[in-house]
């Protein structure tokens, strides 16, 4: 079975640089896959992406060595299993708030006896190799998103669920849940404390911690803190900001 | 009929800032349409865009006041008329190298007696209004791309074809045709001379001149020269460069 | 944030005229959006419409001032949140039968602290404006469909759930649930009594009542009764009936 | 090979009732196919329809006995052959203005020795049967659209081209070409004279004449004149008009 | 209402030959529909197939007399009802492990009073006829997939749920659940015993038993045992194996 | 620039084994790409494949080392250049019947000064590398299809056009053109003579000869004759035949 390079990076003590895809286009995904990311996450939750186009995006990513990940829209076995069958090498599940939810997520990602995933990895066999069935449980990443006050409260029992590979902080929702404005790159002490608590709990259980960021500077701080899976921005946001810069530069010229 | 703001900008002596779309996605197009461009060009030639998705992109652009344009893949009445019927408010036609080609292009864009366009503006009626038929010939822009040595040689007869609104220099193909490497933002004297010749001929015939650029700095120079329709980069290039910057910023941190 | 004109109509004591979309086509949606409706509902339940094409339909509708709504296929946070992120300005949820279901529906539609919606309004920000996050909870409409005997029994507790903006009667399912044939424009006393009970309960709690109809005549009766959100037919039914009329007219000529 | 019922209707001296499809949707097409039309034409010229969705529309139509036709966007062997391979049982070609164009059209529709169509009827074999190759030249309809003054001038030589099955008058373009407003259901004497001339020439050469109409009343007149292939309106126009009627009916109620 | 030929085959004591579709393509589906299968199952679970393309596949199948079935991705009323509305004449539900799950599945497939299916069979009316509403509960097939040890343990209570038409053994998952490798055509005594137990329980309750197979030989054994709904391979597997044979045949020639 | 392995095979004196894709599906293409072919040809002529889905198929193929080729629907610069921009590493052009047509084909495939291809290899840069512009003319394959009596008559002047890499015999059309039934694996002496003439002329000009076949046995004969690019069947035909075998095998069991 093809190795999961994100897992390898983590085993080597490194940090994985993850890109984020919200544009429903295999060409945009392939373009992103040539920019040096370690992994790319096809976002079926807040991205404008449903199942069918997501598969073509996984295909586009796998024209390169970049590891294809996906965020599912919700904790639902149907889409979890479909994305894994389609060859995602790891899934981010939003709003995992309790041990029970973490177990349900992992159960849907793992074949028996570790879980209840149904067998039929139709595209995963092509991407990963004929021995996918034997190694998938040890290869595919399970990443639970921690983004509510409730999840922070339950963080110890969440990270102690067997089979959980990583937690991923959603700082916008987490801050919102704690009573702050929706934004990235949190500096409010209460939110920072929550982030630190998650990081610490994960570390104690050998679970990797990741976080979504708006700037390289903040992401660097997070890496320094110990986060080993960092995302900065997304395809659409990067494109929009760069376009705005061009327009502003040209408009400045005209005044 | 809805006014064509690019035409209005030109009538006021202004310069139109044009964005470029090569990603086949209505969501990417809508995102771009919120960044301040005067017009956006759906590129059916070198973009990864066929007819069907192009229509959804025109729809996405027309959720905003940005003027929807398209570049057709070739001088072919079928796609020219289909894109106009779909509501494009102007077309860029590649590789217009002679008076005959300019006439064929304009003929396909204009209803009789000015041309031979077939009547059936199925979406254009929705976008432009019920009186589209009466005003389309005076509203829709015809933009001939000048991008070969042959076209430069024939520039006077091209710009003198009645009904031609603008010429648009393709600096990559133009340079290639003149024996240089394919790239934007030309400084080779031979290519600059060709560009200047096109600009001058257009000016003499009351035809607007436009050009595609790689940088704001070069585009500013072109505006200063007299170009009144400038494009910088494209959706995919902007996204890729911004993504590369993020990755480089994060990688720098890790070494 | 862009105002929700349906909410404004209701605040002014008016009745909103809603159109219904079951054809999976952005062009059909845009055509419908030019016929004078106050709102159009993209039907992901009984329409032949999945998520991805639904987004292009919302885009098509938002080329006009018509308010884009959607009916989700079921009470499921995944699709509820995805449709809101895609810019729907209101959601109809089918088969809301109890207080708990109404609360679950509203919770998925509202950001904390009113609910548990996850933040990431990727297209809604484009459609509604940058301040979407601050005003979405007060702007987006929550419409619970009342269409079973159980829901009628529980109507008082359903309409008293905080944050519920409207109820929408599904007369076909409601009649079926009460033991009658599946059809619109109900006149069976038992069904009429149920409809009246829902209308009355809604009125007592300041919740708007709406209903789906087959004819203008019946819809007028409903408006007279106090319904302030009425739908008549759907895109496909209107097209089919009009086509049948043409064919019948021509066939009559041939015999 | 499956019979072509339009051809059979004509052989029996009857008139074929044709519906028109401009909405790019297989579901809309299937809905239309249940309304009693003899044939349905997938319009790739002025409809919002490219090749890929057109194929699904042909499939939808062939769930019923309705004969699937297509109008190609232009006289181009590529799309002509692709639509025939996809199972269209007849093609309407726009803007056939001369004998040479009629010959080019028919040549692209017929296998050698009658023409130069390339063999590969990938879906037509499924729809028509394994003996498609032997009978296609005698089964598939070639319909040349007559819609310019030039075509009317050349009508005798056009209708005398061997293999031409029918001519189809485009009254909007024809009137426009003759100096009138673009509209259907022509009553201007010059346009009526042109229509009559086409009808007469077709009749003399055993070629069927057809025409596109806006109303049943006008279509009946055309049938009485001798037209044996009549279309009234289109899917999108029928839907829009019916929707407008509903809205007007409801708005009347509110004032 | 159009008859369900699978039900008729069973009533006549016959065995239905079912094909399996995992390629998301209406053309591939139509091609398969011409190969002699009694039914074809559009697999939304392990196939690379989401809702929207599944509908076009149902349309493609219904150009022929082959009965269109679907496997839903999970026990979820949303997709169950959408596939039935789209005209599926039977549904296979994966991982039905208990009486409660069987009841939930059947409830979602049946209109009141037998179940809680919502009424709106938008395409089913076209495919089946205007009287769909009256006969759907007796026509549409409910097929529960038995593929875990738990389901085998609970088989008697599952097959005794009113309205269940058939059980369908998933031998890959069933074997995996019992501790064996994931594969078809089981010969392990424990798995064979489980299969026999399911077959026996089904027979006692008048429920049809079906099974998925890898080879004709094994399928024949199953038919001999009493299975009356057998599938062999899938579209993609058949294509891949045949392609491999060609390549091997040609490679052999080159060495 | 990524090497073109087909060119390398030919340079080493080998024969390339080519597969054929007519199903419009990236998943079907990726499945085929894992079966051992040297190249796969996306058939936009007789396959049910338009531009947009063709791009996703090229992406799917390039998840593997298989060389992605395409057959364009006709000799048209628009689609030729679009497919090359999309990353096709070689194009088959149908119905090349004369020196002028061969020159037009090659001109559209080559950048100046060898041809008139416009520069904008948007996806080809991703697939092939940043130096695509410098090496494309020497890397991308031009393959002219010889499939009419006229082409055979003109074969010497066709194969002597500079820049032509290969000819590809279409035996179905060739036989049809010579007065025989449309089929593969020709044995009629006249057709065999024509095939031999093409092979001989190609060999004399250093042009590779290829041919499409129905069986491995016939393809072997062609390889023995000197053909170095052979195709057998297509995705859809292989799938259909294998399905038919399964059904026949099971039906045999039931009688």
Image: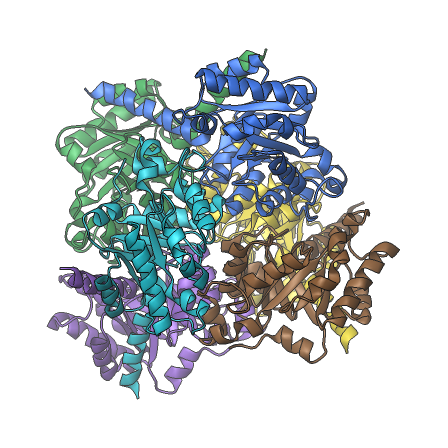
Chain colours: A green, B blue, C yellow, D brown, E purple, F cyan
In this view, the residue in front, B68 or E74, is B68
Q: Residue furthest right?
A: D189
Q: Which quadrant of the view contains residue B254?
A: top left
**For the image shown, how many numbered marks are present on the structure?**
0
**Where does residue C185 sit, x and y in percent of width and height?**
67, 62
Whether residue C192 appears in this view of the structure is no
Relative to E205, B36 lies left or right? right
Q: Which quadrant of the view contains residue D10?
A: bottom right
Whether residue E85 appears in this view of the structure is yes
**Where does residue C225 sit, x and y in percent of width and height?**
72, 52
Q: At x 74% / y 43%, what residue is drawn?
A: B112
Relative to F43, D181 lies left or right? right
In this view, the residue in front, C235 or B56, is B56
In this view, the residue in front, D104 or A242, is D104
Q: At x 21% / y 63%, what residue is drawn?
A: F224
**Where does residue D15 sit, x and y in percent of width and height?**
72, 73
Q: Which image quarter holds the C terminus of chain F?
A: bottom left
Q: Which image quarter holds the N terminus of chain F?
A: top left
Q: At x 44% / y 42%, what residue is drawn?
A: F108
In this view, the residue in front, F44 or A45, is F44
Please determine whether, in this image, residue D219 is positioned above or below residue C109: below
**Where does residue E221 sit, x and y in percent of width and height?**
21, 80
């Amino acid at each position: 079975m093809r190795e999961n390079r994100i897992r390898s990076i983590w085993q080597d003590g490194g940090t994985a640089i993850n890109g984020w895809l919200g544009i429903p286009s295999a060409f945009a995904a392939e373009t992103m896959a040539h920019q040096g990311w370690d992994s790319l996450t096809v976002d079926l939750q807040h991205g404008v992406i449903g199942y069918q186009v997501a598969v073509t995006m996984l295909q586009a990513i796998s024209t390169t060595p970049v590891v294809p990940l996906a965020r599912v829209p919700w904790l639902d076995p149907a889409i979890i299993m479909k994305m894994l069958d389609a060859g995602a090498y790891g899934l981010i599940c939003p709003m995992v708030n309790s041990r029970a939810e973490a177990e349900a997520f992992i159960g849907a990602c793992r074949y028996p006896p570790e879980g209840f995933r149904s067998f039929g990895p139709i595209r995963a066999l092509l991407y990963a190799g004929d021995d996918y069935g034997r190694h998938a449980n040890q290869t595919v990443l399970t990443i639970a998103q921690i983004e509510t006050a409730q999840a922070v409260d339950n963080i110890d029992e969440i990270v102690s669920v067997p089979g959980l590979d990583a937690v991923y902080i959603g700082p916008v929702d987490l801050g919102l849940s704690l009573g702050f404005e929706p934004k990235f790159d949190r500096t409010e002490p209460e939110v920072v404390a929550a982030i630190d608590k998650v990081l610490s709990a994960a570390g104690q259980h050998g679970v990797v911690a990741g976080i979504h960021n708006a700037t390289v500077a903040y992401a660097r701080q997070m890496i320094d803190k110990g986060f080993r899976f960092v995302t900065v921005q997304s395809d659409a946001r990067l494109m929009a900001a760069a376009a705005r810069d061009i327009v502003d530069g040209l408009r400045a010229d005209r005044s």
